[in-house]
Amino acid sequence: MELQRLTEELLQTVTSLNRSCIPQSVQEPLKGENFLLDYLSAQNGCSTPGALREVLGVSAPRTAAMLRALEEKGMLRRCADDCDRRRVVVQLTEFGRTSTEQMRITLHAHVRCVLEQLGEQDSRELIRLLGRITEIEAGT
């Protein structure tokens, strides 16, 4: 196996895929504020700033800035926890829920289109390989 050549090919392909092939409508839900909204949605619309910071892998000030920006857009609200009034809880608003759901619908439609063009066998192989890469990376 020509590991050096394969390394270069993989890096070139991933770079090309990231730069030109993936439309903004697909990239946006996977990063920053949209990723935060999607995570909140998956957590039944509720989490803590600390948990969000850990999931996002960013600093506390960056998390606070993202929460402030999303709050100003009407996507979420911060309030005291019902059980412990000293603890802050972040909740999606109805506007945040509908926006996140629309974003998810757009993302799924695009991915479905790509998978249809790949075909079932190649799609399964792609998913298997990406899962394997995730396992390897988790072990390092």
Image (cartoon, rainbow, N blue to C red):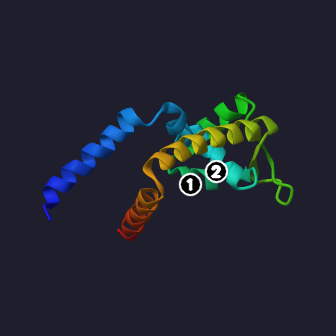
Q: Is residue 102 above or below residue 89?
A: above
The reply to whether the C-beta atoms of the residues labelled 1 and 2 are less than 8 Å apart is yes
Q: State the quadrant of the N terminus.
A: bottom left
Mark 2 residue element = helix
Name the side, left or right, on which 72 lies relative to 124: right
Q: Choose between 113 and 90: the one closer to the eye.
A: 113
Q: Residue at x 75, y 41 (%)?
A: 97
Q: Please state which amino acid type lies under the numbered disc 2.
A: Tyr
Q: Which residue is mark 2?
A: 39
- The image shows residue 76 at horizontal and vertical percentages of 74, 39
Q: Which residue is mark 1?
A: 55
Which quadrant would residue 110 be assigned to in this image?
top right
* Residues packed near mark 1 inside 10 Å, few (<14), some (14 to 19) or many (20 plus): few
- The image shows residue 48 at horizontal and vertical percentages of 69, 53
Q: Choose between 26 and 72: the one closer to the eye.
A: 26
Q: Nearer the viewer, mark 1 or mark 2?
A: 2
